[in-house]
Amino acid sequence: MTRTGWIPLFALLLAGPLGACAPAAPEPQAFRVVGSSPPGSPWSSQWLRFEAALAADPALGLAPQLYVQGQLGDSERTIQALRRGRVQMGGFPLSAAAALVPEIALLHAPFIFNSEQQVDHIIDGYLQAPLNALFEAQGITVLSWTEAGWNHLFSTTPLRGPADLAGFPIRAQPTPASRVLFGELGADVRPLPYSELLSGLQTGLVRAGDGNLVLYFQGGIAKEARQLTLTAHAFEAGLILANSQWWESLGEAQRAAIRAALGPRERLRAEVAALSARLLEQALAEERVGVHRPTDTELAQWRTATAGVRPRLVHEIGGEARRIDALITAGQQSFVVTPDPG
């Protein structure tokens, strides 16, 4: 071989080991994220921020595929897909989460919370750890608690007091708390998934239900059930969950980035509260709905009429329900209202 023939051979030998030292860009790991968020809602915006935050750091190698507007089915169906590992992550209301951990349905018992301060005090200080452990036993990791605001009654004709619900066909969410609540009030209880609520109202199968203000207005319910009773009888918490096997397969930096990308709960709370107030104000100004704000006397009637719901739920749910109920009571008793600094 001539001297000049050694030059390209030497160059190839040199380039081989040096080229091997340059790491290849990681193949982005796609994972499915599910939810049932109306377009333009605070929860939909949260997921878009989540996607953008992870995309901003390609080195993480994470590529979320968002199906957060119910494209893969309702929450009751997708939470089972999460448990089986067919989807990896998602946001779920309590009504769906109760299918895996029935004890969480106690948070839908009427009038256990009086304020958002009390919600934080009880859930963060007393319930998160034991409930998170119950999800872990089901192969599910709780990444974050979230929320959708206060639940109120909606109906086709006004509901001013508990007596108005006697025999009234009402949609119950697919959770024991909803069924027991309306059964205690003597209503004609008809369990329906959220995906069938609108058609149920349109056909007259149901004439009432309950839910938060954002879903009531943005989900089209207000067009079919134009009466709103602001009972605030339950606080609609929710959870962002991950399949535990998938979650543990991620690196520590990836897990930290996912948690950070979800953003603070306080931001979502402020967005939900602001949107709820704006939607209600617009509906009143345009006279699209009739709104009844219960007096203190009427609220006392609702509380009295539903007092038996919580003990019935504890008995019916079984499992760890008695322990969770005792923790709720401890949180209620230890809660002290923080004075307004203004």
Image (cartoon, rainbow, N blue to C red):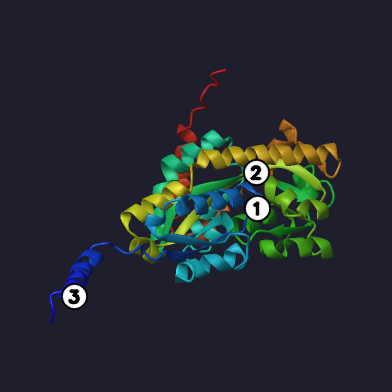
Q: Tags 2 and 1 in contact by the CB under 8 Å rule? A: yes
Residues under labels 1 and 3: Cα distance?
Answer: 82 Å
Give coordinates of residue 270: x percent, y percent.
Answer: 59, 37
Depth check: give the residue in front, 118 or 84.
84
Q: Locate residue 169 relative to residue 317 in the image: left or right.
A: right
In the image, which disc is placed on residue 51? none
Earlier-in-chain disc, 2 versus 1: 1
Q: Quadrant of residue 114?
A: top right
Identify residue for label 1: 181
Q: Residue at x 53, y 47 (%)?
A: 146
Residue density around tag 1, few if under 14, some if 14–19, many if 20 or more, within 10 Å:
many
In the image, which disc is placed on residue 9? 3
* SS under mark 2: strand
Q: Is residue 84 above or below residue 178?
A: below
| Residue 311 can be seen, yes or no | no
* SS under mark 1: helix
Choose mark 1 or mark 3, whichever is in front.
3
Residue density around tag 3, few if under 14, some if 14–19, many if 20 or more, within 10 Å:
few
Disc 2 residue type?
His
Disc 1 residue type?
Leu
Disc 3 residue type?
Leu
In the image, which disc is placed on residue 233? 2
Earlier-in-chain disc, 2 versus 3: 3
